[in-house]
Image (tube, rainbow, N blue to C red):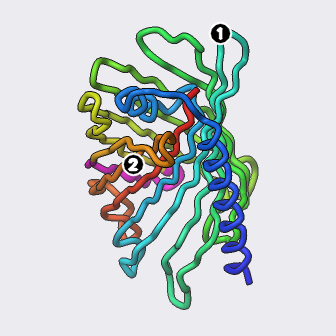
Amino acid sequence: MRRVKATKTLLITVAMLVALVLIAASAWAAEQSSEELAKAAQNPIANMISVPFQNDTNFNVGPEKRTQNILNIQPVVPIRLGPDWNLITRTIMPVISQPPFGPGQDTQFGIGDTVFSAFLSPAKPGEFIWGVGPIAQLPTHTDNRLGSTEWGLGPTAVVLRIDGSMVYGALVNNVWSLGGNDKKKYNNFLLQPFFNYNFGKTGTYLVSAPIITANWSTGDWVVPIGGGMGQIFKIFGKLPVNATFQAYYNVAHPEDIGPEWSTRFQLQFLFPE
């Protein structure tokens, strides 16, 4: 029953986002070069609405060395706070296919915990683009294996620079659980350095954006190395889409839990002004 409910919720959510994409596509008429669009897509706090669908497939997960799949639906919506400041909101809703981690368990499919971030960023940045704000974790999971019952809160920040053909920087956050007993408490760190090299007006670029995580409660780290390529193209004649494919090997990961390596495929619908 939970799996059916989770599937219905996912289908409704995806249908709403697809409808948003189609409506915006029919109304949007701005023209930007593929190079400009690529650099904007590579900026986590660009003043631009975008709807990324990021699919991470993790291999050799758990004691049975199975495959885990996480589809992150993560719309980014900027809000103007006057002539000098913007508030860039980012919501991440994961849809998870979780392999068994013990005897008698089956693969569990459903929605995980939602993560919401809000970055306060200058509307007219200088050489470095930056944003700071809060990050919150909401217990929206459809099964206890897919999330925590505790709410979470912490700080987040991002800094980057656009230097000719290159876009590079880092995003960082830390989330602490609010309340709960020792078994339910969490203290999770995330660092995502990113480097992009753009090949001029082609809209093609190289990318490396490993997601480094740490569970301070257990001392477990996941440290990937790798990268991939991206491409800007347009659908419906005008709607730009950013597609990327990356692969990573985890030089550090929790023993007997993994993952040992992963792939990331993303389609990001862009709505520049």
**Residue 24 image offset from top left, x and y in percent:** 64, 42
- Please give the residue where the numbered disc 1 appears in the rendered image: 84
Task: Give the left or right position of residue 233, taking residue 114 as reference.
Answer: left
> Which residue is at a point 43% across and 15% down the rendered structure image?
128
Q: Are marks 2 and 1 in contact (CB under 8 Å)?
A: no
Amino acid carrying label 2: it is: Ala
In magenta, the rendered stretch is 215-228
Cα distance in 3D space between marks 2 and 1: 31 Å
Other-residue count near label 2 (Cα within 10 Å), few / some / many at <14 / 14–19 / ≥20: many
Q: Residue at x 24, y 32 (%)?
A: 199
Q: Position of residue 54 (x, y in %)?
A: 48, 54
- Labels 2, 1: front one: 2
Measuring from the top left, give residue 22's x and y in whole percent: 62, 50
Q: Nearer the viewer, residue 187 or 65?
A: 65
Quadrant housing the C terminus: top right
Residue 220 on the magenta segment: yes
**Disc 2 secondary structure class:** strand
From the image, tell me which residue sits under label 2: 243
- Give the answer, above or below, for where 142 lies relative to 162: below
User: Label 1's element?
Assistant: loop
In the displayed structure image, the side of residue 180 where residue 222 appears, left or right: left
Q: Is residue 151 or residue 108 the one in the foreground?
A: 108
The earlier-in-sequence mark between 2 and 1 is 1
Q: In which image quadrant can residue 139 be found?
A: bottom right
- For image coordinates 27% across by 48% down, the residue present is 228
* Front position in the image: 207 or 223: 207
| Rendered location of residue 223, percent (x, y) | 34, 49
Which amino acid, mark 1? Asp
Along the line of sight, the residue nearer the viewer: 178 or 190:
190
Circle 1 Cα neighbour tier, 10 Å, few/some/many (<14 / 14–19 / ≥20)? few
